[in-house]
Image (cartoon, helix red, strand yellow):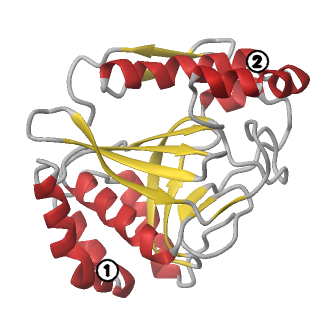
Amino acid sequence: MKAITPFGWGILFVLLTAFFPSNPGFEESQKAFPRVRDAYERKEELFAMKCRTRDIPETFSNMFIRVFKEEGILELWALDVNSRYVLFGEYKVYAMSGTLGPKRQEGDTQVPEGFYYIKEFNPVSNYHLSLGINYPNQSDLILSAAPRKGGNIFIHGGHASAGCVAMSNYYIEDIYMAAVKAQTQGQSKIPVHIFPFKMIPINIENHSGFAERRGLTAFWKNLTDGYRFFEHNKTVPEVSVASNGTYLFSQPSTASK
């Protein structure tokens, strides 16, 4: 689902933020856009209160997103004052097109599965507000044989999805504000992990036949390794990609930024 800016200056702004992600004035520059400014005016105090109740610094310097397709939920995690990840919020996804399984080509309407990060902010999106993820990533490029793998995958507002994660406008405001605050504080890459479902034994067993028919058994096993890394350590892993497209996970040397 493309999140196209209606004005040329909006396109320029999005491109600039992708190249200069650690701008200390990023939050103020975002608030110059009416939709972002309106969200802040209505919600900033509630946001600060949620931080206080969870022992999360109000500066909100580090966050992490997980999406579960079958459950239709988006989780937003953040580091608390003890540098431990705690759940800041769980949001119902309004729409996700396609079915279980990764995105492998343009036009398949699939929501990607894998380990990504936010690469752009669009405050003048056709879908209220939107956060672009870096699909296709290196694993997608290796594992897909399609000449056109697609792109323009966003977490956005609105009511429709063609490969994107569509939230309500109300929820995307919360998620967008959090991402703006994290980027302002220097988190240049905000991880976004997208799974077919919660990778727990009962779900894996229930979908084993589907995985085998679709050739997804090894791929989902690899996703499970990344899911369990966070569940066991409550630390977002460093993610790299092997030459065969497999994700590799390691303990970050410092808090990810």
Residue 109 spot, x, y in % from top left: 80, 54
Q: Secondary structure at mark 2?
A: helix
Which mark identifies residue 108?
Answer: none
Residue 142 spot, x, y in % from top left: 72, 24
Could one spot residue 59 in this view of the protein? Answer: no
Camera-nearest residue between 74 and 206:
206
Q: Residues within 10 Å of mark 1 (few under 14, many from 20)?
A: some
Q: Amino acid at mark 2?
A: Thr
Q: Secondary structure at mark 1?
A: helix
- The residue at 26%/40% (across/down) is 86
Q: Amino acid at mark 1?
A: Ala
Q: Are marks 2 and 1 in contact (CB under 8 Å)?
A: no
Q: Which residue is mark 2?
A: 217
Camera-nearest residue between 124 and 213:
213
Residue 179 spot, x, y in % from top left: 33, 57
Q: Quadrant of residue 90?
A: bottom left
- The residue at 65%/75% (across/down) is 159
Q: Which residue is mark 1?
A: 39
